[in-house]
Image (cartoon, rainbow, N blue to C red):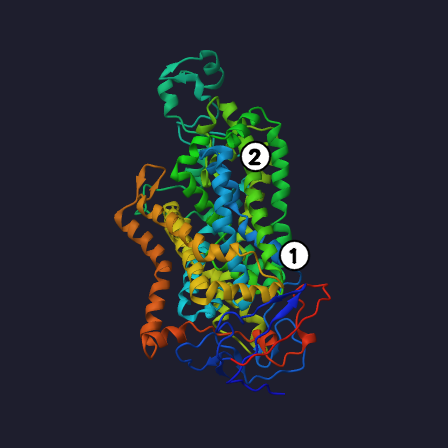
């Protein structure tokens, strides 16, 4: 039977749960808005008519076939494909954990905590978590769940700002391109761990230089004078002076720079390709492809292993770490509070930047993951639980890292500040050096790099899934003939395209290219810019109260008003404060604090950063200029939401009460439906 399009009225649903009324727009004019006549386009999309000034959101009522057949996975109802959903809700939780909990939790947070006052760093970290991290984290998941769309089409909630979706797609594409290199390096180290003698622990390899020394203590010499001759005779080669010791090179550094990277003298010297790294790159891309090719049904199962096993390895490494000499000193360096640090602006900036990085905000992948939720999933509780897991993992990983670094400092006779590293320096220099000093070194090396591989792998393939979801949402397909393969083909194209770009990063100058991507394409400024606009659009264009009503419709109760206050005032101010701090304190990119990038390298970097940031203002200007009518009419029309097909089930006036989802599963409370003429 054909459902007729409504052009003069729209139902407003209000649901009474647990004795209180949940408004769905009654108190906010235009929440469900004036109706836009809708017809089905040839491509399966919806064509909405114009609205005059003052028109609110559009209620999508279309002349579409309401077939009686049940909508299975990939099935089409009335010419429209039913969106795939998670097999279990735990699939969503584990996917979010796998994506958001990544390498930054292990190699960045512990170093920032030590650098910024130890335990005191938790004060700004937790504060910014509640005023910036959790509100936007919840916003992205809830927005995807409500709109049932990926990072681009989700902004049909305010079509004028669809550039936000394109911006996040550019950022996540860059991330997918360069992040995979860390996995390739980790996979290479993992393979090399299966040797009786670790190749980075000795100096008798073809890539080692004459300055390589396997084992020495830094406290042998002081101010160029030998102070411990007995120890020197036991650890240094014969006739080596303190001057020679100052120029000595560790085998782990030479393995990293001369074997893994085979690094050239600069960005302008790409050199030859590393064929071993090429094979590792191919291997990890194949892993990513087969984790994603079947969609969320396969991804949701794989993350059970990739998201949980790293915790097992972390516990094993912690037990081993705390039994090593020097571990207590390392842990004390990590958590000992330095209260004077709270007065430094850099501490607060580092806390805010780490929150946005580790919560994976602004990439659009959280929106894509949320879009596969059931409409009435309690995403509010999910957001708090996921934030707790994310931050808790970061804090826990610090004990693992600094127990090992404390042991390493004790073995070398130096202060922990001289061995504390972050980023690739921790993963591929400090930690491999530490495990080479342990008994049964290959076992601990293999465990660590396997954990590193899993931490990065789920972040990578969920990022690819988020990108592919956004692309496929732009091209709805109604034919079952092609529906089966379109996701596999899209994932393959994405992987191949990223792989081709990655070839520039496995050359001798590849590390310089990698740093360009890391420093500019997905930098703190681009993520902060994205988060700022997300809050502004939802809170001030669509309406914070209005979105709170939508959330209430989904989860069965209204979230605490704190979320609304954060979206409207606090979070945008926090984002802009950190954004301008980064901008005013910008420093040109360098490698190892010695090589300064050429001017054209800086230009390439800024082009990558602006390629995402400019999507938003350029898209706004283009839509306003190309629309017809007065400026007010254009604004009204372009900020009118375009509802998806799934909203009919929850918003149509003749919806059967029994077909409505229970907003609180297991509750017998009465659901009352009111109709009003707009």
Residue carrying label 2: 399
Which quarter of the rendered picture does the N terminus lie within?
bottom right
Locate residue 367, reporting x and y percent. Answer: 52, 61
Residue sitting at 58 percent across and 70 percent down? 83
Q: Is residue 72 left or right of residue 485?
A: right
Is residue 302 visible to us here?
yes
Q: Residues within 10 Å of mark 2 (few under 14, many from 20)?
A: many
Residue 542: image x %, image y %?
45, 67
Task: Kindly indicate whether the residue at mark 1 contacts the one at mark 2 (C-beta within 8 angstroms).
Answer: no
- Mark before the other along the chain sequence, 2 or 1: 1
Locate residue 556, reporting x and y percent. 63, 64
**Disc 2/disc 1 C-alpha distance (Å):** 28 Å
Residue 454 appears in the figure: no
The residue at 61%/62% (across/down) is 557
Element class at badge 2: helix
In this view, the residue in front, 118 or 403, is 118
**Quick one: label 1, few (<14), some, or many (20+) residues within 10 Å?**
few
Which element carries disc 1, helix, strand or loop? Answer: helix
User: In the rendered view, would you say 221 is above or below 142?
Assistant: above
Q: Label 1, on which residue? A: 90
Q: Which mark is residue 116?
A: none
- Residue 637, given in percent of the width and then of the height, sits at 40, 76
Residue 101 versus residue 654 in the image, above or below: above
> Which quadrant would residue 572 be assigned to in this image?
bottom left
């Amino acid at each position: 039977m054909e459902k007729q399009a409504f052009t003069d009225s729209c139902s407003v649903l209000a649901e009474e749960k647990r004795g209180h009324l949940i408004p769905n727009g009654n108190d906010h004019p235009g929440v469900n808005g004036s109706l836009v006549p809708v017809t089905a386009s040839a491509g399966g999309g919806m064509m909405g008519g114009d609205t005059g000034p003052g028109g609110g959101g559009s209620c999508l009522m279309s002349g579409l076939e309401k077939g009686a057949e049940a909508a299975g996975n990939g099935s089409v109802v009335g010419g429209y494909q039913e969106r795939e959903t998670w097999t279990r809700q735990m699939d969503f939780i584990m996917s979010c954990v796998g994506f958001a909990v990544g390498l930054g939790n292990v190699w960045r947070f512990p170093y920032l905590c030590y650098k910024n006052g130890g335990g005191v760093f938790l004060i700004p970290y937790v504060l910014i978590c509640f005023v910036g991290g959790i509100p936007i984290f919840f916003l992205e998941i809830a927005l995807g769940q409500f709109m049932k769309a990926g990072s681009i089409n989700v902004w049909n909630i305010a079509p004028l700002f669809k550039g936000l979706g394109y911006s996040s797609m550019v950022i996540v594409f860059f991330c997918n391109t360069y992040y995979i290199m860390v996995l390739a390096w980790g996979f290479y180290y993992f393979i090399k761990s299966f040797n009786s003698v670790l190749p980075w622990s000795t100096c008798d390899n073809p890539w080692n230089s004459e300055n390589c020394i396997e084992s020495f203590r830094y406290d042998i010499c002081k101010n160029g004078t030998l102070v411990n001759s007995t120890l020197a005779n036991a650890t240094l080669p014969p006739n080596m002076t303190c001057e020679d010791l100052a120029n000595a090179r560790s085998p782990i550094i030479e393995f990293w720079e001369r074997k893994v990277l085979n690094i050239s003298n600069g960005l302008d010297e790409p050199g030859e390709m590393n064929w071993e790294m090429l094979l590792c790159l191919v291997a990890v891309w194949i892993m990513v492809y087969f984790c994603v090719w079947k969609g969320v049904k396969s991804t949701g199962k794989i993350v059970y292993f990739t998201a949980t096993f790293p915790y097992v390895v972390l516990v094993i490494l912690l037990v081993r770490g705390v039994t090593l000499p020097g571990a207590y000193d390392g842990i004390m360096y990590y958590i000992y509070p330095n209260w004077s640090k709270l007065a430094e602006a850099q501490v607060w900036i580092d806390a805010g930047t780490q929150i946005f990085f580790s919560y994976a905000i602004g990439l659009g992948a959280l929106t894509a993951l949320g879009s596969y939720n059931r409409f009435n999933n309690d995403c509010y509780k999910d957001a708090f639980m996921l934030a707790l897991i994310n931050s808790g993992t970061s804090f826990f990983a610090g004990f693992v890292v600094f127990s090992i670094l404390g042991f390493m400092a004790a073995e070398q006779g130096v202060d922990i500040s001289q061995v504390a590293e972050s980023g690739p320096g921790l993963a591929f220099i400090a930690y491999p050096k530490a495990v080479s000093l342990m008994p049964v070194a290959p076992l601990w090396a293999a465990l660590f790099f396997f954990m590193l591989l899993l931490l990065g792998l789920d972040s990578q393939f969920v990022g690819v899934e988020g990108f592919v979801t956004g692309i496929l949402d732009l091209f709805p397909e109604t034919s079952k003939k092609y529906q089966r393969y379109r996701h596999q083909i899209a994932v393959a194209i994405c992987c191949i395209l990223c792989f081709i770009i990655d070839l520039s990063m496995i050359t001798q100058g590849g590390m310089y290219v990698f740093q360009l991507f890391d420093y500019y394409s997905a930098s703190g400024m681009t993520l902060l810019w994205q988060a700022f606009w997300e809050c502004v659009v939802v809170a001030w264009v669509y309406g914070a109260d209005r979105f709170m009503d939508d959330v209430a419709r989904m989860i069965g109760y209204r979230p605490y008003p704190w979320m609304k206050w954060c979206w409207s005032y606090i979070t945008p101010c926090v984002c802009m404060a950190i954004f301008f701090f980064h901008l005013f304190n910008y420093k040109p990119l360098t490698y190892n604090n010695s090589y300064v990038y050429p001017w054209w390298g800086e230009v390439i970097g800024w082009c990558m950063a602006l390629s995402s940031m400019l999507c938003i203002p350029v898209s706004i200007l283009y839509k306003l200029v190309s629309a017809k009518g007065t400026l007010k009419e254009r604004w009204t029309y372009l900020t009118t939401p375009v509802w998806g097909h799934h909203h009919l089930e929850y918003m149509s006036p003749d919806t059967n009460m029994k077909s409505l989802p229970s907003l609180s599963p297991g509750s017998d409370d009465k659901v009352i439906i009111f109709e009003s003429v707009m």
